[in-house]
Image (cartoon, helix red, strand yellow):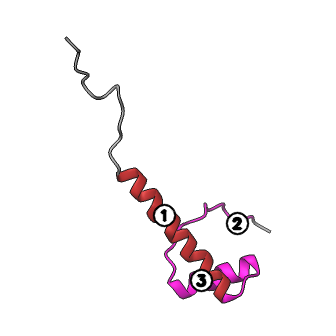
Amino acid sequence: MTKKAYSSPTARKLTLGQAKKLIADHRNYSEEEAAEFLESLQRQRRKNDQKRNEPVNDAKKQKRKRSA
């Protein structure tokens, strides 16, 4: 018997329906709970994207004006 060669896991794109089913099966959720879970992930991702796009207010990067 020969061993099967190792292959690393690959990422794949799922349709929304496939993602709901996968989450529902994996977490023992109903389809409605899976949909709510996906929506919470989307909200979190948008929030993180907004934070990433905000300008950084770093005092070290700003030129300071000296008072006379």
Quadrant location of the N terminus in the rendered image: bottom right
Q: For numbered disc 2, what is the local secondary structure? A: loop
Q: Is residue 27 left or right of residue 42?
A: right
Q: Residue furthest front?
A: 68
| Closer to the camera in the image, 6 or 37 | 37
| Closer to the camera in the image, 33 or 12 | 33
Q: Position of residue 21 (x, y in %)?
A: 64, 86
Mark 2 highlights which residue?
4
Q: Quadrant of residue 46?
A: bottom left
* Residue beneath the point at 66% across and 88% down: 31
C-alpha separation, residue under disc 1 versus residue under disc 3: 15 Å
Q: Is there CB contact under 8 Å for labels 2 and 3? A: no
Q: Is there CB contact under 8 Å for labels 2 and 1? A: no
* Residue beneath the point at 66% across and 78% down: 23
* Residue beneath the point at 70% across and 66% down: 4
C-alpha separation, residue under disc 2 versus residue under disc 1: 37 Å
What amino acid type should be assigned to the residue bearing mark 1? Arg
| Closer to the camera in the image, 17 or 12 | 17
Q: Position of residue 35 (x, y in %)?
A: 59, 83
What amino acid type should be assigned to the residue bearing mark 2? Lys
In the image, which residues are magenta? Answer: 3-31
Q: For numbered disc 3, what is the local secondary structure? A: helix
Query: Residue 45 bears which disc, if any?
Result: 1
Query: Residue 35 bears which disc, if any?
Result: 3
Q: Is residue 8 left or right of residue 44?
A: right
Q: For numbered disc 1, what is the local secondary structure? A: helix
Q: Position of residue 39 (x, y in %)?
A: 54, 76
Q: Quadrant of residue 67?
A: top left
| Closer to the camera in the image, 63 or 52 | 63
